[in-house]
């Protein structure tokens, strides 16, 4: 009985699925199961409904594949690694983008709205354009090709000195294998960042999701098979925020403290 249920679930998953999604995580060395189309309870990942791509850059599902708050969260410090695992993946062209978002309060009230998402990592195309092209399959110049297969991971670092708090992390694959028909694959999870860092990205690093790109952007709608276009690729969105060195931060907060002390002295004198 149990085994026939498991077989049915496996068949449904296989049938539903040329595409892919983040299905689990490793955060600071600890394994965390993800949500899945089976809607597992008690995961760090926001629930999502299927493996299908999002095909419009303006789709509200762009944010977290339609998911909302999870019951669990992972804990990690700035500089720790976050690996996302794709249970299956089949497409060899397109960028990998990893974003974070600082919740104003608890996760239950955190919906990822506003221009507050920032990239912590990205990976694109490094082919030379003469032997490895944008549409090359094997070997591919795209980092995303390394995810093709089962249970492959992409690893990123939490920015150095990132201010502590409740964060969403969003992994996004943009599959470009169909000419001028981009496919977006985003999933989100909840991470509590610890420590006493003070690094926060300024507005130049931040964007809204959906909203960070338009369907008509030249590196979103891509004529992937046209080898007459320049064989280079610029990953969409703002620059990657890598945080600040802890030593530098400590010095600058000491300076800030000194500045505050002298300012309050001045205020006392003036008052
Ligand atoms: C990326 O965008 C630039 C313009 O910003 C364009 O010249 C280039 O052809 C685009 N690359 C691809 C692969 O579409
Ligand atoms: Cu697909």
Image (cartoon, rainbow, N blue to C red):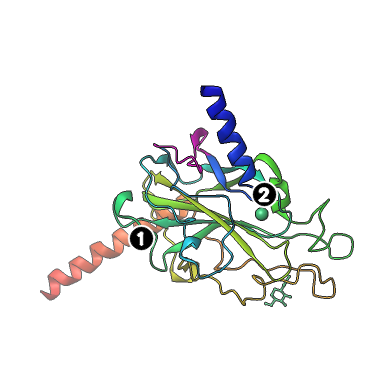
- Residue at the image point whose x is 26% and y is 64% from the top: 260
Q: Is residue 249 magenta?
A: no
Q: Is residue 152 left or right of residue 71?
A: right
Q: Classify 10 Å Cα crowding around label 1: few (below 14), some (14-19), many (20 and above).
A: few
Indicate yes or no: mark 2 CB to ligand 2 under 8 Å: yes
Provide the residue span drawn in magenta.
25-41
Q: Position of residue 60 (x, y in %)?
A: 46, 65
Instruction: Classify mark 2: helix, strand or loop.
Output: loop
Look at mark 2 in the image and give the residue it sits on: 18
Q: Nearer the viewer, residue 206 or 253?
A: 206
Q: Classify 10 Å Cα crowding around label 2: few (below 14), some (14-19), many (20 and above).
A: some
Label 2 or label 1, whichever lies nearer to me, is 2
Q: Is residue 36 magenta?
A: yes
Q: Is residue 206 left or right of residue 93?
A: left
Q: Quadrant of the C terminus?
A: bottom left
222 in relation to 192, above or below: below
């Amino acid at each position: 009985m149990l085994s026939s249920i498991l077989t049915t679930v496996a068949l449904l998953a296989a049938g539903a699925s040329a595409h892919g999604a983040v299905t689990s995580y490793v955060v600071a060395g600890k394994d965390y199961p993800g949500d899945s189309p089976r809607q597992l309870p008690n995961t760090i990942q926001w629930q999502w409904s299927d493996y299908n791509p999002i095909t419009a850059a303006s789709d509200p599902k762009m944010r977290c594949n339609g998911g909302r708050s999870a019951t669990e969260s992972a804990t990690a410090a700035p500089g720790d690694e976050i690996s996302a695992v794709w249970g299956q993946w089949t497409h060899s062209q397109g960028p990998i983008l990893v974003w974070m978002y600082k919740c104003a309060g608890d996760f239950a009230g955190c919906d990822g709205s506003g221009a507050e998402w920032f990239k912590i990592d990205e990976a694109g195309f490094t082919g030379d354009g003469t032997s490895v092209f944008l549409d090359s399959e094997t070997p591919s110049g795209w980092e995303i090709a390394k995810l093709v297969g089962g249970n492959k991971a992409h690893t990123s670092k939490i920015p150095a000195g990132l201010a502590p708090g409740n964060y969403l992390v969003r992994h996004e694959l943009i599959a470009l294998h169909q000419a001028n028909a981009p496919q977006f694959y985003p999933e989100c999870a909840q991470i509590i960042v610890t420590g006493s860092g003070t690094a926060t990205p300024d507005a130049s690093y931040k964007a809204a999701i959906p909203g960070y790109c338009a369907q008509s952007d030249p590196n979103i709608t891509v004529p992937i098979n046209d080898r007459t276009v320049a064989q280079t690729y610029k990953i969409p969105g703002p620059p990657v925020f890598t945080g600040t060195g802890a030593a530098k931060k400590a010095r600058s907060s000491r300076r800030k403290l000194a500045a505050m002390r002298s300012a309050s002295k001045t205020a006392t004198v003036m008052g």
